[in-house]
Amino acid sequence: MKKIIHKVNTVISFLLISIFSSQCFAQSSVNQDRNSNFQYLKKLNSVFDFVQQNYVDEVDPKILYEGAIKGLLSAFDDPYTSYLDESIQRDLSDTTEGHFGGVGLMISKALESKPEKPAYVEVSSAIEDTPGAKAGIMSGDYIVEIDGEDTAPMSMQDVLSHLRGKVGTPVTVTVLRGKTLKFTVELVRDLIEVPTCKYAMIGKTGYVRLIQFTPDTALRLQDAIDYFKQNNFQNMILDLRDNGGGLITSAINVADKFIDEGLIVSTKGRLPYQNSSYSASKEKTVVRNIPIVVLINRGSASASEIVSGALKDTHLAYLVGVRSYGKGSVQQVIPLGNGEEIKLTIARYYSPSDTNIDKIGIPPDMEVPFETLSEEAEKDYVKLIESNQVADYVDAHENMTEADIAAYAKELAKEYKLEERLLRRLIRMRVNRYKTNVVYDLDFDIQLNAALDLLKNTKDFSNLVNSAKTLKELQEEAKLAEEKAEKVSESKQ
């Protein structure tokens, strides 16, 4: 027991002393009161020992140790700073290696649950061709229950253990969309193989969707560009919607295919070694003088925002869709030994115009939101989803054509007050559930259609892109508007 307590104290000491007294950190901590650090550490050790010796029941020291570490790292109110035990690392490893058994949802979760804002599981994005995506779960949705159990008090580890399991087994999730739209769907776990890139020609437009930033993303993007060139593409759409990010090096390599020279992204932290700049290289640029539209939405985060921000600030692309997620921070993983690690935010990244978008996101140059459902339509949507009516009909009518889909949608529209376009989408998703080659849906996708129309009808696309404001100009404009509003509010008081 004493050995375990000693290990706990040693690890805590490492976190509070060794890291903070390293050579890199010493330069920025000259004015810190070292005595305060030791006093806090001494109190922490005393509390640990007192609880261990005096609590009414015998306490596993590992529980106290993990609780102390988690409490320390949650004090920042930073969802990206966390403690990773062995089981969480296995889950993360499964995901990054590109295959695991689950439902295919990229998720996040607030550290603290409050009555006014429960810590439900937020869907960052639904991975292409997975049970979650095929069930219609979208970025921005909240999973409020898993198999009837409230997700607010769950830890992320609990959530992952509930969602993942043996391939072929079901899990039931209750989804909250917006403030009131709530529905329950059963997902059948599958082997999740995370794809990287899908592409196709739409007329003379090269359309490529990047699904995640992995070590292979830039290579697969090059395959797409080569294909576009073989088909004499005249313009290009880069779809980053619902791309939750990935490797920063992958984002840089992707952006470098479009940017001739200059800064792509920089990182800034408290310490000199955390400050880095990544610039473009002419030798790596393969797309020049081609009109480019980038599609973004709330599911576009991190590495996706690096790419879209870089192309916007360098006036090489026009952004269409809705505001991105706003994840502009950099994390470092620090091993503690015995399969344990902590993930710590050490820097923020900045676009070429020297702008950070953390918790702000990137606004599109042209906003194209999907329509929100009316209260009556929401009730009918829930009723239709939970009835399983579409699935039962499609399963009983194999090889449905687009004409069949349209005809069935008309029939459903007589019973449910929903747009036929949405009904066709729901039917088509069920029809295509076993297909992995569906690249786009022009019938439903108003954002993609808006991008195609923009490329087709804009006479001087270069002028349009050059006239778009940089991220820095937009943030400065927003700040001035906020200050003006405050002055008006003060004058009225």
Image (cartoon, helix red, strand yellow):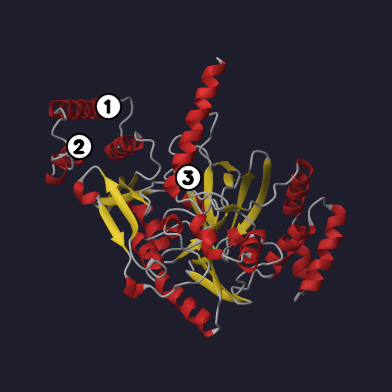
Query: Would residue 157 be seen by someone viewing this image from the given angle?
Result: no
- The residue labelled by disc 3 is 474
Q: Amino acid at mark 1?
A: Val
Residue at (24% x, 42% y) in the render? 270
- In 3D space, how far apart are the residues under numbered discs 2 and 3 (Cα atoms)? 39 Å
Q: Nearer the viewer, residue 271 or 261?
A: 261
> Where is 411 relative to 81, above or below?
below
Q: Are marks 1 and 3 in contact (CB under 8 Å)?
A: no
- The residue labelled by disc 2 is 16
Q: How packed is label 1: few (under 14 Cα within 10 Å), some, or many (20 or more)?
A: some
- In 3D space, how far apart are the residues under numbered discs 1 and 3 (Cα atoms)? 52 Å
Residue 443 in picture, x, y percent from top left: 71, 65
Q: Amino acid at mark 2?
A: Leu
As helix, strand or loop, the secondary structure at mark 3 comes to helix
Residue 79 in picture, x, y percent from top left: 40, 42
Residue 381 in picture, x, y percent from top left: 74, 50
- In 3D space, how far apart are the residues under numbered discs 2 and 1 (Cα atoms)? 21 Å
| Residue 388 sits in quarter | bottom right
| Residue 27 sits in quarter | top left
Residue at (16% x, 30% y) in the render? 32
Residue at (66% x, 62% y) in the render? 445
> Where is 288 relative to 493, above or below?
below
